[in-house]
Image (tube, rainbow, N blue to C red):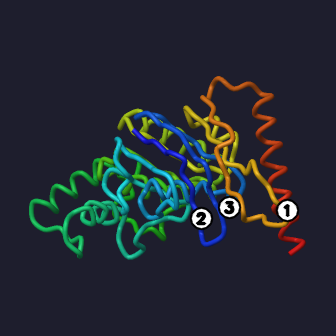
Amino acid sequence: MIEARNLWKKYGDKVVLERISVQVEEGEFVTLVGTSGCGKSTFLKMLLGTETLTRGELLLDGSPVPGEPGPDRGIVFQQYSVFPHMTVLENVMAARGFARPGLTGLLFGAARRQAREEALAMLKEVGLEHASALYPAELSGGMRQRLAIAQALLGRPRILLLDEPFGALDPGIRADMHELVLRLWREYKLTVFMVTHDLKEGFYLGTRLWVFDKVRHDPQAPDAYGASITYDLPVGQVDRSTLDEIDRDLTLTAKETEKHYENH
């Protein structure tokens, strides 16, 4: 379904990603881990279509990923992407409106009634039917993320992109969100890519784990090389020693990066 062929991403002289070559089948749940700034979110944005690659290919069903977001790819960020002046129900309906042709995203008549019915059904799916008349400011963090997921799923995407969606949530709420995402992944037969800073979360949620890290380093030119996928592991078939090894590698990379910026 998704294939990257020798993908590189640069911003000016700074190399963010290099030599990424992977294939992903439909229905996989891929978690992406790595230190801050290693290109995980950049890769997600290239899948979404809001970032372009510098070199190589990124293919969806054998064709280049479209250069703009589309209804086949839904995304949820850590920062809640909701409209504060709209109710929960109106926020979800807006997601359907903006997916239609035209600039305003407004819905009328039968289209509005259908969008309302679909939005209410989706709110029930994510456990927010009781909060449909509330505004985002009246919601807890977990409820806002449920709302963002409802927005992303209303268009029935094939691919769900999650960019550290649970990083700001308390552990108990995160556990509830884990169960929700796993249920929706199975129920809607989604292909999921999820960025997380939590290695244990990555192992728990995904069917496949990618570790982004730099394999080439130059202390005199730290931006000359980018991150690659240094581990590509089927979750559930990894022993504890491999998990500890990955954790050590990421900790070492983070310390080296911190030391570099302290010296400059």
Q: Earlier in the sequence, mark 3 or mark 2?
A: 2
Q: Secondary structure at mark 1?
A: loop
Per the model, the C-alpha gap separating discs 2 and 1 is: 19 Å
At label 3, the amino acid type is: Gly
Q: Residue at x 66, y 67 (%)?
A: 14
Q: Residue at x 28, y 47 (%)?
A: 121
For residue 89, what is the image quadrant? bottom left
Question: Depth-wise, is mark 3 or mark 2 nearer the camera?
Answer: 2
On the image, numbered disc 3 is attached to which residue?
A: 37
Per the model, the C-alpha gap separating discs 3 and 1 is: 17 Å
At label 2, the amino acid type is: Lys
Query: Which quadrant holds the N terminus?
Result: top left
Mark 1, Cα crowd under 10 Å, few <14 / some 14-19 / many 20+, is few
Q: Secondary structure at mark 3?
A: loop
Give the mark count.
3
Mark 2, Cα crowd under 10 Å, few <14 / some 14-19 / many 20+, is some
Q: Earlier in the sequence, mark 2 or mark 1?
A: 2
Q: Is residue 114 left or right of residue 166?
A: left
Q: Measured from the top left, where is residue 247 in percent x and y?
A: 79, 42
The label shown at residue 10 is 2
Q: Is residue 176 left or right of residue 97?
A: right
In the rendered image of this protein, does residue 133 appear above or below residue 196? below
Q: Secondary structure at mark 2?
A: strand
Q: Residue at x 62, y 50 (%)?
A: 196
In the rendered structure, are the residues bearing label 2 and label 1 in contact, judged by CB atoms less than 8 Å apart? no
Say which of 43 and 127 sits in front.
43
Q: Measured from the top left, where is residue 101 in percent x and y?
A: 19, 66
Q: Residue at x 72, y 63 (%)?
A: 224
In the rendered image of this protein, does residue 14 appear above or below residue 163? below
On the image, numbered disc 1 is attached to which residue?
A: 219
